[in-house]
Amino acid sequence: MLYLLYFGGSFGFSANLRTICSMSGAGKNVKFFDFNWKSQIWNLIFLIGGLAGGFISSHYMYDGKTANISQNTIHDLQKLGFSAPDEIQPKELFSREAVFSLKGFFLLAVGGLMVGFGARYAGGCTSGHAISGISDLQIPSIIAVVGFFIGGLIMTHILFPVIF
Amino acid sequence: MKYLQYIVGGIVFGIVMSKSEAISWYRIQEMFRFQAWHMYGIIMMAILIGTTGVFLIKKFNIRDYRGNPIPFHPKDRSIPRYLIGGIIFGMGWALSGACPGPMVVNIGFGYYAMLIVFFFAVLGTFLYGYFRDKLPH
């Protein structure tokens, strides 16, 4: 975050989603996307860097380790039908079989929709609010992060037992 | 190459996020079940460094690499927008196990299923823009 501030940017990843809408021509019909997206190219470049960073760590730095999560979490997730982790993402959600099943596709789609809609409604995501906003001691960011947790707890503790 | 610093920043971000397992759905579940310090440690460390840095920038009027002042934009005061938007975001975060940054890092890592999540996140952003005037802010 400080690095980006120093180079004239700011740390807020979900702003890229708005930029992509705008680049795709959404600004013609919806005023919210009618802005000079070219001023955001630096952030898209940061996104591409993130893509490359993920590639580098899986191809050149990955030691085949699994996500080393707590035994309690493994136990709770097993009750929902998730096997113990053998890589960093669960195959129950992200494997090819899961993606091409109706339910699997639907869950990923709904999750993505909520993240995109919620991030813009709240004016930021984890980077913009939880990191940048709270570092600047902004009250709205604290409210947003409280919201993130209320939503996450509802999903994890109330909806997961229904969905899985 | 005036964008070099951003691509370098992004690569470092991608490597740190994946090596710290912050891109893992399991880690997000563990966080929302309060069963480990892992994610809280990462987030609190980022906030600690961030808060100190912002404090120093303001106190000593530190400028950016071009010599321009570094602006901080106070966000609009409101409760419903941050709370409702935040709750929707949080539900999606717990379900997909990724916020926008980690989605992209996951795609780079080779989890192409995240392309679906990312595509729908862009669509969700579009829907927000479309219905913006009808939502309480």
Image: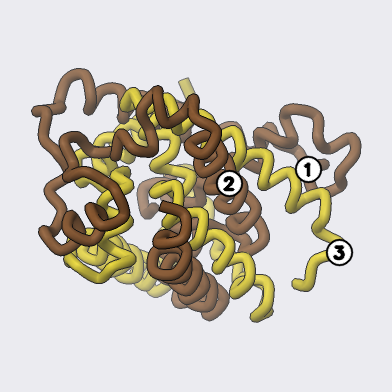
Q: Residue at x 75, y 47 (%)?
A: B127
Residue identified by numbered label 2: A110
Task: State whether residue A114 appears in this view.
Answer: yes
Task: State whether residue A44 appears in this view.
Answer: no
Callout 3 amino acid = Lys
Label located before the other in sequence (2 or 1): 1
Sort mark 3 into few (<14), some (14-19) or many (20+) by Cα contacts within 10 Å: few
Residue identified by numbered label 3: B134
Q: Residue B1's x, y, as percent? A: 46, 20
Q: Residue at x 12, y 48 (%)?
A: A68
In this rendered view, identify the residue nearer to me: B91 or B136: B91
Chain holding disc 2? A
The answer as to whether the residues below labels 2 and 3 share one chain is: no
Q: Colour of chain B?
A: yellow
Q: Colour of chain A?
A: brown
Chain holding disc 1? A
Residue identified by numbered label 1: A33
Callout 2 amino acid = Val
Q: Residue A90's x, y, as percent? A: 29, 39
Of circles 3 and 1, which is in front?
A: 3
Quarter of the image for residue B76 reads bottom right
